[in-house]
Image: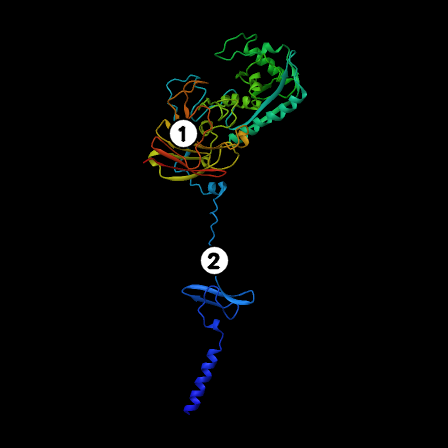
Amino acid sequence: MRRRALGAVAICLIAVSTLPVASVDAASNGGRCSKVGITQKTKGVAFTCTRVGNSLKWVKKAKAKISTSPSVQPTGAELLRVNPSSPEPLQNCRLPDARTVKFAGDWQAITYPAIANHGFTNKGALDVAVVFVDFPDVVGGSAELVDGIAEMKKAAEWYSWFSQGNVKYNLRIADRWVRAPKTSEHFFWLHPGKTGIQLMPEVEIANIYRSLAASVVDTSGVVSVWVVIPKAVTKIDEGFAYRAFPGVFSNGSDSYRAKTPIWQHFVHETLHSHGALGHSPKNANIGLFWNTGAAGATLNAWDAMTLGWMNQESIYCVSRNNLKSQTLALVPLEREQSGLRAVIVKLSDYEALIIESHRKDKWSQRWPSGTAGVSVMRVDTRLDTVWDQGPSTGKYLIPAAPHSLEFMREGQSFTVDGVKITVVQATENDQIRIEPAI
């Protein structure tokens, strides 16, 4: 029995001694192994048996790569959809007119409600006759007539968008030039405050233009006649404005010299007939209600609100004493996009901050490429607005420089009147944060 036991032990020892060495070796990088695909851990490190050339070797398993791709930012449209509702109704931000002096008279408003005059309305349809008038000394060309017709149609498009559908302009546009009975210098208009000699009284100029318009288009029921003159005219240096019903407006050679789209002149003048004073704030690049030739041909939120053309969903209204930290996405004024168009922080019964977004877009095609950012306007309804240079109800705090387009950009903050404004994100829309200043 003892012999048999010793024999069995000897056989076992022989068998162990003939096993492949790799099957008992601890796995190590490059060490030998016995079967492709098996895995083993040594000191917490995982190895896999892999064929390398004609040999099987342990190869350290590669760690799973952790994705380092940046998180995807929400689109502007997504940000607009999650905007909170205004904490206060629109009417809370309609400040009363607190002026003691009204340079332009009571008929031009700086606050809601503007009262339209001379047949105009701030809610409804308006019929306007558009006529192209040349003169015995300056003949209009066929090419500029075609261009002029196409351009003037933009006025109706502008009103449709910036009135938020409250008014519709039906333009009855003549398809040919009509000749004035007198040479061009007879239609020179002496704008108030200007020196020079006017050869015909305003009422006579207006009546001639009305008669010429009636000879080529239906003028029955129109609230205004818009007169476009040839580009070659030099003796009519600026536009004509006669507001008695029906109003008569013409452009002047200054529009052509400045390369201003002529439709902007007529929109600016008829905005006054809608009852608003405009001409505020004073930045020649932002808003055609201050400057007819503005490259950013928009209507700011304050003027739109004055005219009754700002909807509740387009305004975030909050009083400073109710202000809490809030992030909001804005629609650029220059783009036709639905959503929040302005944040108004009411500071007092007659003061407010107006925060708006801007982009080079449909209504600012003449802006430099890349123009974008956030503006901050301060309104004080105790201040009268004087045309051109002088005081103004509204003043841009950002951009700070006159006629500048230096808006607030992503990451920048501005603090005024106890309110801190930060541009959090700038994609196709600006996202801002407003909060009480510490």
Disc 1 residue type (three-letter): Arg
State whether residue 55 appears in this view. Answer: yes
Image vertical order of residue 182 relative to residue 148, above or below:
above
Answer whether residue 219 is visible to the viewer in this image.
Answer: no
* Residue at x 50%, y 66% (from the top left corner): 57
To which quarter of the image does residue 251 belong? top right
Q: Secondary structure at mark 1?
A: loop
The local secondary structure at tag 2 comes to loop
x 59%, y 18%: residue: 227
Q: Residue furthest bottom?
A: 1
Place of residue 121 in the rendered image (x, y in percent of width and height, measured from the top left)? 51, 25
Q: Name the quarter where the C terminus is drawn.
A: top left
* Disc 1 crowd, CA 10 A, few/some/many (<14, 14-19, 20+): many
Q: How many numbered marks have been drawn onto this rendered protein structure? A: 2
Q: Which residue is mark 2?
A: 64
Instruction: Give the image location of residue 79, x and y in percent.
Output: 46, 42
Amino acid type at mark 2: Ala
Whole-percent x, y for residue 204 in the image: 57, 11
Would you place residue 389 above or below residue 362 in this image?
above
Image quarter (top left, top right, bottom left or bottom right) of the N terminus: bottom left
Mark found first going from the N terminus, 2 or 1 = 2
- Residue occupied by mark 1: 94
Residue 370, compared with residue 226, is above or below; it is below
- Residue closer to the observer: 1 or 329: 1
**Disc 2 to disc 1: CB gap under 8 Å:** no
